[in-house]
Every structure is written in C-alpha cells, then in structure tokens.
Image (cartoon, rainbow, N blue to C red):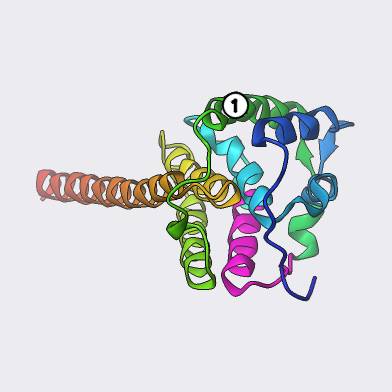
Amino acid sequence: MHGTADFQDTNASLSETLRDLIRGIRGPTVTLRELMDRIGEQGLLLVCAIASLPFLIPVSIPGVSTVFGAAIILVSIAITLNRMPWLPKKILDREMDTEKLRPALEKGANVVSRLDRYLKPRMQTFTTGATVNRLNGMAITLAGVLLMFPLGLIPFSNTLPGIAILLLSAGMLQRDGVIVLAGHVFNVITIVYFVVLAYLAFSAGQGLASFFS
C-alpha cells in the first residue's frame, strides 16, 4: 500500500468495533488480511489496538506473536512516517487457528470495554501534531519490538508491551493524552522488567559457573 495515511478518529467505541470483528470471524482459520479487510477504513491505529489484544493474557498464543507483532511494527512505522503500510504476503496470509484466537480477542474485548469508560479527549497536546504523532508512533514501534522478544513463556513478557500498544493506540484514536502517557509508562515498565530478567539470568549463570568451578 502506498500514499498518505489517514488518521481519523473512529466513531464507534473500541469494544464495539472489536465485538463486531469477532462476530465476523468464520471458519477454522483466519488471516491478518481478512481481519484488516473487516476493519476497513477505520484506521491504522485500530489495527495496532486490535493486534495487541491477544497479548493481554499472561502467556501468549504460539504463532500469533509473530504475525501480530510484525504487523504492529510495520503499521506503527507507517504511522511514524505518515504513510500507508507495506505488509509482506507471508504475514498477511498466514493462517491462525480461530478456536485459539477467538477466546483471546473476547478477553481483550472485556478489557477494552472497561478502558472505554475512561477514554475521553483531554491533554490533547500529547495526541495532536505531526511531531507528536511521530513520537507516539515510534513508541508503538518500540513496544512491538519488545513484544517480539522470544520470551513468550515468561509471564507478562508479552502482556506489558501489549498493554503499552493498546493504550498508545486507543489514546491516539480518542485524543486522550492521559492514556497515551500511560502507554509510554508501560513501555518503560517493560524495559525495566526485561532488564531485571536479564540480570537474574546472568546472576543465575554466574552462580552455576561458580558452583561447578
């Protein structure tokens, strides 16, 4: 896809849009292309928000992180550059198990329905303007990269960046600067969490080395 991206607000709430999407899923498998076709012209930010939902459970679904994580990174880069995204056919047409994906989306819808209550236009300095959109787009890209780390079996390693992506996307859609700032905070929390995991792994390795030496 080419051209300039159109970052318009969505009129429907995120939870309503998500439930419409879930009801439209048919067959034993679904592809990202099919999901994006159903989302239609409602925006790239909505793609990022919906792609983050399977990661709001403590341990992610095998195979989904590759497709949705890559999509989030490529779409968020497009948001940063204010361009329509290019997505490889391998990502768009990879089949995902509907029976595993649907429950994750439904749980995500429940989370989003609670988030909808707090979303409202405020502190719009953090949600308007080309420079701000680029910075927020870069933050979604960062969260997407953190999401792709091969730590899916470690609790919250996918959940924390998934929350950051959802908050950043939803906040930008609804012009809610408070929610956008919360998304940036979750990015920081994710980085700190990964640093702690790396330190613990290093310390354990050092302890084993000392034990056997």
Residue extent of the magenta highlight: 67-87
Q: Position of residue 138 (x, y in %)?
A: 49, 65
Q: Residue at x 34, y 48 (%)?
A: 185
Camera-side residue of 114 and 57: 114
Asked whether 78 falls inside the magenta stretch, the response is yes
Q: Position of residue 158 (x, y in %)?
A: 47, 42
Q: Is residue 69 left or right of residue 132?
A: right
Q: Residue at x 52, y 45 (%)?
A: 121
Which residue appears farthest toward the right when viewing the image? 27
Q: Position of residue 205 (x, y in %)?
A: 21, 49
Q: Quadrant of residue 30?
A: top right
Q: Is residue 213 left or right of residue 147?
A: left
Relative height, residue 10 to residue 61 (above, below): below
Camera-side residue of 25 and 151: 25
Q: What is the magenta segment's predominant secondary structure? A: helix
Camera-side residue of 121 and 104: 121
Q: Quadrant of the N terminus?
A: bottom right
CA neighbours of label 1 inside 10 A, class few (<14), some (14 to 19), many (20+): some
Q: How many marks?
A: 1
Relative height, residue 208 to residue 108 (above, below): below
- Asked if residue 63 shows in the view, the reply is no
Camera-side residue of 53 and 155: 53
Q: Is residue 2 left or right of residue 212?
A: right
Q: Residue at x 58, y 46 (%)?
A: 174
Q: Quadrant of residue 14?
A: top right
Q: Residue at x 64, y 68 (%)?
A: 78
- Asked if residue 8 shows in the view, the reply is yes
Q: Which residue is mark 1?
A: 113
Helix, strand or loop at mark 1: helix
Q: Position of residue 6 (x, y in %)?
A: 72, 64
Relative height, residue 181 to residue 156 (above, below): below
Q: Amino acid at mark 1?
A: Ser
